[in-house]
């Protein structure tokens, strides 16, 4: 087993990986950019190395700086987290050349599954069901236009190199295509360094269902069942759950087998996710392989009772899979809500700034994978994900109630977040019924605004008055032993009407 | 003691008094409240209002007081603080005639020119922030009277990118 | 189902029950004594009622005040937690008369299992294995002396009415007996209002293994496997785990069946625990029924994937058990560490005072059931339990490492706690091997002192200097938006040697 | 800047200096340290010492500074603070010739009388606190010179219950 691993990432995912390292007796090395000196991942690692300035391409995407940090600290392996260099086959290749273990698939498999067009070809040959679409990626708007006409509108425009919804757009008619393609290419270039896009038929009323897989370097693979990730805004998941309310045992079994087939034909190893679209008639279409630890991996961990990061590290170290498909079962229900710095009242625009105060939810069946803290600055440079709140319970109903209660008691003050919005999704009757489709938000919560009764406003005004009163009486504070004296010590006994 | 707070352009006046054992009386508009209150930590209050329990978390910036109560966040303005126009629709810090972004970012494309007539909801400018392109839409119909930034410029929250003359 | 439940308790257990109520759509009512106005359980409930002064018999043991609070708030049921009135059959009887549902067994069963001597009689008749000992309780020291001689030293002296190790003493020879019996009677009187004690043969090198059971009001009962609770100090558990390293499948099955037999013959309903001593030859002896939700219930929840408080409430509301024995299985491993305000360097004497600062551990597989917070006062009036840290992992080895990591990153400053001691137990080679016997602590960690290397002292001195430096420069703080300015803003640029 | 702290009766002197970017130098005895430090919250420090990360949590009472580092708590005395005798063995606040309790409680039984000779480890008094009876043992051999409390009395931390004349 490795003695030291460098985590080439930041935020909640870096911290989650570092905690796994600690539990496995492995030292962890953080890397950080100039504005991340005080970030939580720096304080969670055993060692920390400065790798450059704030813009990602000068730090977290800077391969040379990261490889240097590995050498300087004597780390033997790199965990890339998600995003940044996680699915960059050139980086995996570089690691292979330098004799550093990249905790993920090898560069060849990474290159194949990362190229959506190439991976379509390989999987199509094997009879894996695919959505009709372009056979090759393009940076040519006119070519895209011609292909779109062939496929038939509406079409979905996607970045060839990327994931996470970046660059993705629904195009309903030919006169929307040019603007959409140009913007998509710009985003793809900015996010992945590759502007190529491709088009596919837009499946209406779909669900997004994905299968978690683990594959070792000795040709053994298992799947860990599904995650339903249909609740999305801006084509990005915000709520994921397992099991899916749409799958029965037969469909689950068939989709799991297809997922393992995809893994087999692409020579994929380590942890990965096979994404499918599922239509209303239970037809499923292979979308792509997410060649990384997914943001939403905790729901699988809680339902299957395994630890995916431990598994990634053990597989990368060459271990044979210690579980067979028959050892695995789903128990209870888990839901994840992604906590983003964004404004749900304003088209989910990202929000940056200082978190003046926050308090993490806790309790039985509540897990909070968190990258921020009271007093930290949320920077405009990086992905606006702050944390992930996950609940598990014996049933989906209790899991939803547990999540709603946790979201309700989760103050994050100073920046905008989606917490109130997420709570309103979770308690929505259609969500509780399990009617989760990718158009859930535009259909069920269009133009969402937080409801604010008079009663609550009065309570807020009372609280603000108490705060202002206390603040105005507050003495010089000396460190941690803050005593908040009663204002009455200085003001004496008041009565209403006296001023 | 009296306190004033702003919400959506309205001023709210609260009279509040109490005794050393943490029993309070307060008046908001014509409603009277009696409650017990305790300051648990600098940002946390426990209020018992007719035995009903209420947790409140409060923090402040220069301009605002943020209150979390009943699972919701209410942002109150401090009267006399610098920022005007709480609750404007053109971005968090914007008012209807000034279009700004809620977050720092880079102006990718300005979609309108000085003198253009624009409709409510029409995209005016695309700003890249946190790796995403975000369309900033017009909060109102009107005429563009000034475009203060060009493609590629960096922009800070609250800086007016575009000024409008609203026709509504 | 109930609409409102009053929780007749305080601290972490009251909070844990209130969270369950919230998830079930039930309003919760807290009761609090004069010094508990700012306690966490008051802030977690939907309503809160003052019931008296700080001493327990004026508040949390005051039946009239609690019954009045139920009537005043319109609650339909009482959850007693553990301790206080949880196992008081007179209180259960009172509830029955008042038409209030007591969430626990009925008063008859409670009276039977609470009387250790009576319950010995009933179980002995059914062929359930028991430790040789006195057939009746006593308050007569001379009688105890005679019985002790009959049983043969060493004997164990126990309070008849109580549990939790209060009043319990090992007596090695006749000349120790008088003092031990008198002290035990005083403690029993103070803790339970009944000075009666009894004696039994002291089993050497035992393990303490208990079975969680659930029984509905329709004669259905299941067990949820075992908890091993052998790590004790002062005859009180501090670390519990499930599964036990001592049980094989056959022994587990037999003990489970015995536990269900005990439940059956005593007419017990709701959640309960059947306690056994297990000797080195795998002989097991029934000790007693703990007629309440146990402190250590979370390890069972995490391993079995159920929620015991939800189950208690559903059973009390009259529901039939929704699970059969075959539905249940143990998955992975869970350990609980009890965080006490006590001094492990000084005979585990309780410690009271103000928690100047604390930070709860978090992470995958980490649960913290907590009753305290930064700034709270730990009172001398109540049980010194602060919180419970529980970890779950796929294997015992990882579970131990996860626990050690969590304990390591769990600052509680201002009062003494057992956190460092617990960490040293968890990482002890004998603990890791699963060699957990009730004499673990005197054998493996006698005269424990925290080890403090020079290196760590220097780090502490550096940290204290940074703190003092910052504190001395700190401005008047205004509420939550505390800005900690760099001292250099006021002090300019220093160099070493300059002063 | 210089700071002094007490531990187990010894005084430790720390010289510490730094620059605006958070780089520090410190000297303790003859050891020199160079590190980067950051104050994350009033009670939390992040220190990078030769790239090794170290989290420290610090809080203070009137008499002490509590530091949590590397999973351990170190209690340092502030020189000049009221309480003497850090690290005494006769209870947290006690010194060898004064027996007190670390927590408030009720004296259940005083087991010795004025003038008695006692051995090290001999139980002197039983105090009930937090529902448990606790034996307070003698930290040293010696003679009892004063018994300040009787059965049933309430006692506060730091109040000497018994005074000894140590013979060691």
Image: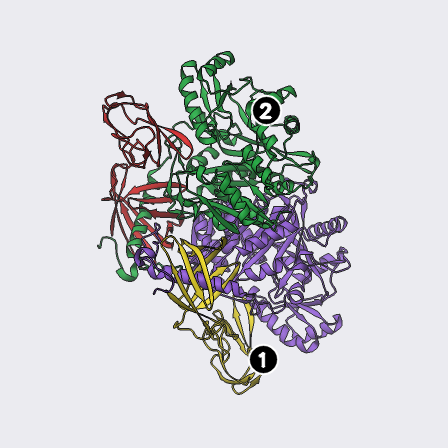
Chain colours: A purple, B yellow, C green, D red
The image shows residue C152, relative to residue C446, as above or below, that is above
**Which image quarter is the C terminus of chain C in?**
bottom left
Which label was assigned to residue D149? Answer: none
Q: Specify whether A302 is left or right of C8.
A: right
Q: Position of residue D86 (x, y in %)?
A: 28, 37
Q: Nearer the viewer, residue C233 or A212?
A: C233
Q: CA distance from mark 1 to mark 2?
A: 79 Å
The image shows residue C122, relative to residue A33, as above or below, that is above
Label 1 crowd bin: few (<14), some (14–19), many (20+), radius 10 Å: few
Label 2 crowd bin: few (<14), some (14–19), many (20+), radius 10 Å: many
Residue at the (37%, 59%) spot, across then down: A470
Q: Secondary structure at mark 2?
A: helix
Q: Secondary structure at mark 1?
A: loop
> Does the CB distance between marks 1 and 2 fall below 8 Å?
no
Q: Position of residue A206 (x, y in %)?
A: 71, 62
Q: Specify whether D55 is left or right of B166.
A: left
Q: Quadrant of residue C448?
A: top left
Q: Nearer the viewer, residue B146 or C270?
A: C270
* Dots 1 and 2 on the same chain: no
Query: The numbered mark 1 sits on a residue in which chain?
Result: B
Q: Quadrant of residue A149?
A: bottom right
Residue A477 shows in the view: yes
Q: Position of residue C474 (x, y in %)?
A: 31, 57
Which residue is the site of mark 2? C119
Residue A378 shows in the view: no
Q: Position of residue A466 (x, y in %)?
A: 41, 60
Residue lying at the far bottom in this picture: please name it: B115
Query: The numbered mark 2 sits on a residue in which chain?
Result: C
Which label sits in the foreground, 1 or 2? Answer: 2
Which residue is the site of mark 1? B120
Residue at the (71%, 67%) spot, across then down: A202
């Amino acid at each position: 087993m490795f003695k030291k691993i460098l985590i080439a990432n930041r935020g909640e995912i870096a911290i989650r990986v570092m905690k796994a390292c600690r539990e496995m007796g492995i030292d962890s090395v953080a890397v950080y950019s100039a504005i991340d000196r005080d970030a939580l991942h720096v304080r969670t690692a055993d060692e920390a190395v400065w790798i450059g300035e704030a813009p990602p391409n000068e730090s977290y995407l800077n391969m040379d700086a990261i490889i240097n940090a590995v050498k300087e600290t004597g780390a033997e392996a790199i965990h890339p987290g998600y995003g940044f260099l996680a699915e960059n086959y050139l980086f995996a290749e570089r690691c292979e050349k330098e004799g550093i273990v990249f905790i993920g698939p090898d560069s060849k498999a990474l290159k194949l599954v990362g190229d959506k067009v190439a991976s379509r070809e390989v999987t199509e040959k094997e009879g894996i069901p695919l959505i009709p679409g372009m056979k090759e990626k393009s940076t040519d708007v006119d070519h895209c236009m011609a292909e779109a006409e062939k496929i038939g509108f509406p079409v979905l425009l996607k970045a060839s190199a990327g994931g996470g919804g970046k660059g993705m757009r629904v195009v309903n008619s030919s006169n929307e295509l040019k603007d959409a393609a140009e913007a998509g290419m710009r985003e793809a270039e900015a996010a992945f360094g590759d502007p190529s896009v491709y088009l596919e038929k837009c499946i209406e009323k779909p669900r997004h269902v994905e299968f978690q897989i683990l594959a070792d370097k000795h040709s053994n693979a298992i799947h860990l069942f599904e995650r339903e990730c249909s609740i999305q805004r801006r084509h990005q998941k915000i709520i994921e759950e397992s099991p899916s309310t749409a799958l029965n045992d037969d469909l689950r079994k068939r989709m799991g087998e297809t997922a393992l087939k995809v893994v087999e034909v692409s020579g994929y190893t380590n942890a990965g996710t096979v994404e499918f679209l599922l239509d209303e008639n239970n037809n499923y279409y292979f979308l792509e392989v997410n060649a990384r630890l997914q943001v939403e991996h905790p729901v699988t961990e809680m339902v299957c009772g395994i630890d995916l990061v431990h598994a990634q590290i053990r597989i990368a170290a060459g271990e044979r899979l210690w579980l067979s498909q028959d050892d695995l079962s789903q128990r209870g229900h888990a839901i994840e809500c992604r906590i983003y710095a964004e404004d749900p009242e304003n088209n989910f625009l990202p929000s940056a700034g200082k978190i003046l105060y926050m308090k993490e939810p806790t309790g039985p069946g509540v897990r909070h994978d968190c990258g921020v803290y009271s007093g930290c600055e949320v920077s405009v440079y990086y992905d606006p994900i702050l944390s992930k709140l996950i609940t598990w319970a014996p049933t989906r109903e209790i899991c939803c109630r547990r999540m709603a209660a946790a979201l309700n008691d989760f103050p994050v003050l100073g920046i905008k977040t989606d917490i109130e919005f997420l709570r309103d999704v979770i308690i929505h009757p259609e969500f509780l019924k399990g009617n989760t489709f990718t158009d859930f938000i535009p259909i069920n919560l269009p133009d969402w605004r937080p409801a604010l009764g008079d009663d609550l406003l009065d309570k807020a005004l009372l609280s603000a008055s108490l705060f202002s009163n206390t603040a105005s009486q507050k003495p010089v504070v000396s460190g941690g032993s803050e005593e908040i004296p009663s204002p009455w010590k200085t003001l004496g006994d008041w009565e209403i009407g006296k001023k | 003691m009296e306190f004033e707070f702003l919400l959506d352009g309205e001023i709210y006046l609260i009279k509040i008094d109490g005794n050393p054992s943490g029993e309070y009386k307060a008046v908001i508009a014509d409603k009277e409240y009696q409650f017990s209150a305790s300051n648990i930590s600098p940002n946390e209050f426990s209020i018992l209002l007719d035995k009903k329990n209420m947790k409140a978390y409060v923090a402040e910036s220069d301009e605002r007081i943020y209150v979390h109560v009943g699972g919701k966040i209410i942002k109150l303005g401090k009267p006399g603080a610098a920022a005007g126009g709480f609750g404007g629709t053109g971005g968090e810090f914007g008012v209807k005639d000034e279009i700004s972004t809620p977050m720092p970012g880079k102006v990718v494309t300005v979609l309108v020119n000085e003198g253009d007539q624009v409709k409510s909801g029409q995209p005016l400018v695309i700003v890249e922030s946190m790796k995403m392109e975000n369309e900033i839409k017009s909060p109102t119909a009107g005429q563009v009277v000034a475009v203060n930034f060009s493609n590629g410029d960096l922009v800070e929250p609250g800086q007016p990118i575009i000024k409008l003359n609203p026709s509504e």
